Amino acid sequence: MNHQLEINNITKSYGDLKANDDVSLNIKPSSIHALLGENGAGKSTLVKVIYGSLIPDRGEMKWLGKSYSPKNPFDAREQGIAMVFQHFSLFESLTVEENIVLGLDGVRLDENFTEQITEYSKQYGLDINPQQVVGDLSVGARQRVEIIRCLMQNPKLLIMDEPTSVLTPQEVSDLFITLRKLADDGCSILYISHKLEEVRQICSEATILRGGKLVESCIPQDYSQQELAEMMIGKKLIQLARSNINTGEDIFSINDLSQKSDDMFGVNLKNISLSITKGSIVGIAGVAGNGQDELMELLIGEVSSPAGTLNFKGGDIGNLNSHQRRQLSMFFIPEERLGHGAVPDMGLNENMLISRPQSSEMTSYGVIDWGNVEKLTQKVISDFDVQTPSTKMLAKSLSGGNLQKFMVGRELIQNPELLIVSQPTWGVDAGSANNIHQALITLADKGSAILIISQDLDEILTLCEQIYVLSEGSLSTAVDMKENGLETISQLMVGSEKQ
Amino acid sequence: MIRLILRTQPSKAMIFLSPLLAITLTAVTAFFIFVFILTDIEVSSVFYALFVEPLIDIYYVSELLVKATPLIIIALGLSIGFRAGVWNIGAEGQYVIGGIAGSTVGLYFYDVEGFWLMPLMSLAAILGGMFYAGIAAFLRTKYQVNEILVTLMLTYVAVLFLSAMVQGPLRDPSGFNFPESRLFHDSALLPIIWQGTRVNVSLIIAIILSFVAWFGLKKHISGMQVKITGSAPRAAKFAGFDDKKTVWFSLLISGGLAGLAGLFEAAGPIGQLNPGLPQFYGFTAIIVAFLARLHPIAIIFSALLIALTYLGGENVQIYFNLPSSITNIFQGMLLFYFLACEILIKYKVVFIKTTGQRI
């Protein structure tokens, strides 16, 4: 058969770990091919092999019918393989065209070049103004810049790493139009994702990896989302359901909270009001950078709030720091794991001490009882299925999913009356995400209140009974999900977006 | 090709081996330097004077302990701040101010004998050092002024203040106008613990302080506060630790200890307050702290090592007329190699063939 890219029996090991074990994959011309797998399944290794940043131990590749073994990414680009990374590499202070020209070899910034950009942007519906400064662009627009930069190299294969993780629903559907057009013009696309609904929507083929091995190459539409997910994680998913929605009186409220940001690029929060009842899960949806970080700082107590704006169990907590708030049974899970929720260079046991209510037996008169800390760490590790050889493993050596399970566990073993969590499953594999969601639901069933701030709309829709949208520092009123809820949310999210 | 590959866990063996490797490399480099610059002197005899003699002669060993004591005390304080990312570079200044404060109390009671005097002088010295470092803490927490600059520049102020004091109010009335204070009387002097040498009780205090610091860093939440603040400031905020308090805490502890060391020097080996008090101990203690990887117990050993470079340096100066900067060269090389070798704790060296296959 005529394949654009043929990958046969690639094996790549790091020490004893086989990151790719005998993986084969074929990409047809003009196809959008999904590469599915959890974190650590070997997706990145395989992509790095294709893109020339890793050289495989065994196996061979064929590109356009010829033997292909790139020495480095430069080599790969020369031959027509381009990649859009999950984390963009753009200079915020430069304009779009300057950024594009910087990423290319042997071109100069002139009128001709600007015209070329405009041409591509028109042809593929990649709405962009070449003279605009990247710092002013939304995430979606930045991604379009990256895509145009790749397209200028006339690729025959475009690799996209988790392209939709930061986009609004509208931006996602725009992206899909572009991708389909690209595929029709003969550029095949390798689409790395763990969002199964999207894969079923746009991809014509899918290759699923698990633990470095090929699980299945299939047509994604032949399977349900659940079946694909189970193939990916290799076990049955728990069906999420609230067993006991028994909401009680208000436990926490934000009353007309406004806060100017100290940071030049920060977002000012405007008149935010919200209240949460016992036993309920409330969600705040919205695109990143619309005030989520600023709001989270205030909720955690890293920045104090004006008197009367934050009320927990009938008391004003605006002035309390995070440690004092924890004493009242209010616990937090920040979005950023390394460096915020956990200290990267410290062991899990030491990281336990970051969140320590007085009532716990971790310290007495400031002296740490390492024996008890060890016991509690063990409990978190076993109760929340954290994969780690010991409690002394450095936080940074754990995978994102494992560290997140640890952080969720660390707060949940305190049985919080209120849990505030930002991006609970950001960058976490499907299996772990499922476990975390279940743990949150169990907590709410027991009568605790949960506030979730998340960009992942699916997550909010699955978990929350009440949904608000945060946009440019303002919080909407609760969205009525019975009447065109999704559309309302989408509009609220995009409505005030930049550009 | 040689590549550094991140270890999954820091190597326990390398924590101990890397300082030894650094010392070996320093000795090897020194050997080559000497081979080049020495024409008429045997390199081996220079090495003997540098490294061997100070370790086999009783007098030298006692002097080693005398020199190491202030270094231990200052480095302990500094290591706490360095862990928190608070860079007190001016321990020398706090050392001088502490020395002046403590000595002033001792001189004020020059005709009174009593066991209480030494503790009172120590308290004054600690408060003096704390006050001086507190200036930097105040400016940093209130106006975000960089503490490196403030502490460093205040050092020069302190040294000038010392000469003003010994030429003015604290000058010995019967001292023929020499810029020196009275000689301290018995109650204002530290008791000698090794007869016939200058080793005094401050050595024991330094060792006790090392263990206290070790306990604090390992077992007390304030030690965790310092470590977390230094390693991940946002995580420290998340934990509810006040970063301003950490700055104050770090600077007050390091200032207080430096002040105490200043008094111990005046009330110990010197026996009076004179312009010879500043010996660069405050700066050298920075090297001591880093050589010990900021570990309180290891500081005892790194202080002894640095003290050895002092004594060895003086030795070759006397015997062979070599410049006194030999000491600085050794200290510089030690720190340089030490920091370079430290990478082996977190990384391992792997030899790779150019084909990309691992050997």
Image (spheres, rainbow, N blue to C red):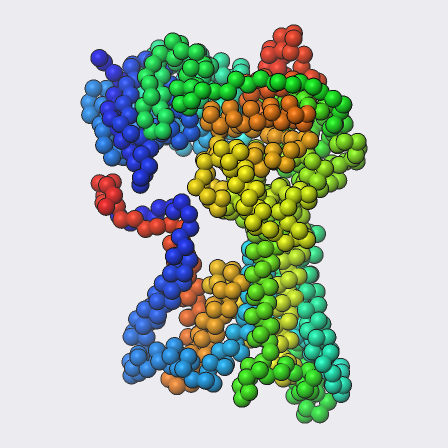
In the image, is residue A140 above or below residue B44? above
Query: x, y (%) of residue A497?
Result: 60, 21
Q: Nearer the viewer, residue A339 or B219?
A: B219
Query: x, y (%) of residue A301?
Result: 69, 38
Q: Nearer the viewer, residue A257 or A408?
A: A408
Looking at the image, residue B37 sits to the left or right of residue B203; the answer is left
Give the image quarter of residue B323: bottom left
In the image, is residue A403 above or below residue B221? above
| Identity of the residue drawn at 71% across and 72% down | B124
| Identity of the residue drawn at 64% across and 49% down | A363
Q: How many marks?
A: 0
Query: x, y (%) of residue B11?
Result: 40, 52
Q: Is residue A477 visible?
A: yes
Query: x, y (%) of residue B351?
Result: 27, 49
| Identity of the residue drawn at 67% across and 15% down | A479
Looking at the image, residue A237 sits to the left or right of residue A310; the answer is left
In the image, is residue B159 above or below residue A160? below
Q: Is residue A344 visible?
A: no
Specify the farthest residue to the left.
A66
Q: Nearer the viewer, residue A386 or B241?
A: A386
Which quadrant holds the N terminus of chain A?
top left
Give the image quarter of residue A209: top left
| Identity of the residue drawn at 66% across and 57% down | B249
Looking at the image, residue B54 sits to the left or right of residue B264; the answer is left
Which quadrant holds the C terminus of chain A?
top right
Give the image quarter of residue A462: top right
